[in-house]
Amino acid sequence: MVSKMNMLVLMAFLAATIQCCGAQAPATSPTRSPVTYTVGDGVGWNVLVNTTQAYERWAANKTFMVGDILVFNFANRTQDVAEVTKSAFDSCNTTSTISVHTDPPVRITLSSPGEHYYTSTYSNHCSQGQKLAINVTSSSAATPSPSPAATPSSPAPATTPPPSSPSPATPPSSTATPPSTSTSPPPPSTPSPASSTTPPPAGNSAASLSVTGLFSGILSIALVLLY
């Protein structure tokens, strides 16, 4: 009987430990590997006939993130790739650029979030639609969730101060006025405000189900051994 009781206590301890560890397991967000985009796909980086919005339409359905790569394909000495500011992009002013790349294929790794603007410094190429504007978002690399907040301890019960002692009776005056027997009422107690408690964040649902099933199995084995 003693051995069965010891086994029951040991299994209960193991089940509680597994349940605690499973509830505190941090969740992770999904990851996304860097993507390489070929600008313009098959048409490459060129001045296209009868359109000035080809690269705008090409970028419209794509999501660009930090770490992604842009590839500009063009024939050598026929084009270049210049990164410019928004004002220079809008006005097609290529006299002042952030950077210029001349040797194809040009590979540009997106290293910072925000808006990025590209065009060509060749005469009239920008005004004829050879320009690309994209918005780069932060990387989607996995980020650990914040640690679960510790459950605050229960607030201490409010204490009521003892009533004050009654005032001593006033001695009789020379005019034989009867002594005063009134006493000062005790001051009202002020209850301390109840502290608000923040429930801990819910754990991973899949881990909770797994732990619950394991706990039930251990408890069943323990009952069989006990009886």
Image (cartoon, rainbow, N blue to C red):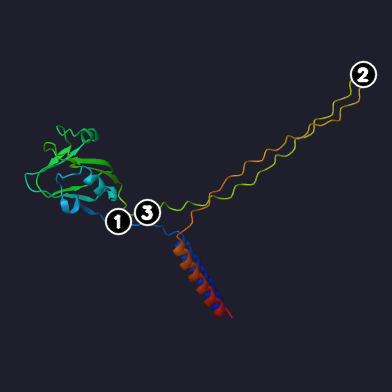
Q: Secondary structure at mark 3?
A: loop
Residue 31: x percent and y percent? 32, 56
Residue 109: x percent and y percent? 20, 48
Say which amino acid is labelled 3. Answer: Pro
Q: Secondary structure at mark 2?
A: loop
Q: Kindly identify the residue that appears in the image at 27 percent across and 56 percent down.
A: 33
Quadrant containing the N terminus is bottom right
Say which amino acid is labelled 1. Answer: Arg
* Most distant residue in the right direction: 176
Q: Kindly identify the residue that appears in the image at 58 percent across and 50 percent down.
A: 154
- State how far apart marks 2 and 3 are (Cα): 86 Å
Q: Is residue 190 left or right of residue 218?
A: right
Give the mark count. Answer: 3
The residue indicated by pointer 2 is: 175
Quadrant containing the C terminus is bottom right
The residue indicated by pointer 1 is: 32
Q: Kindly identify the residue that appears in the image at 48 percent across and 62 percent down.
A: 20
Contact between marks 2 and 3 (CB within 8 A): the answer is no
Front residue of 137/26: it is 137
Q: Residues within 10 Å of mark 2 (few under 14, many from 20)?
A: few
Q: Kindly identify the residue that appears in the image at 13 percent across and 36 percent down.
A: 124
The residue indicated by pointer 3 is: 144
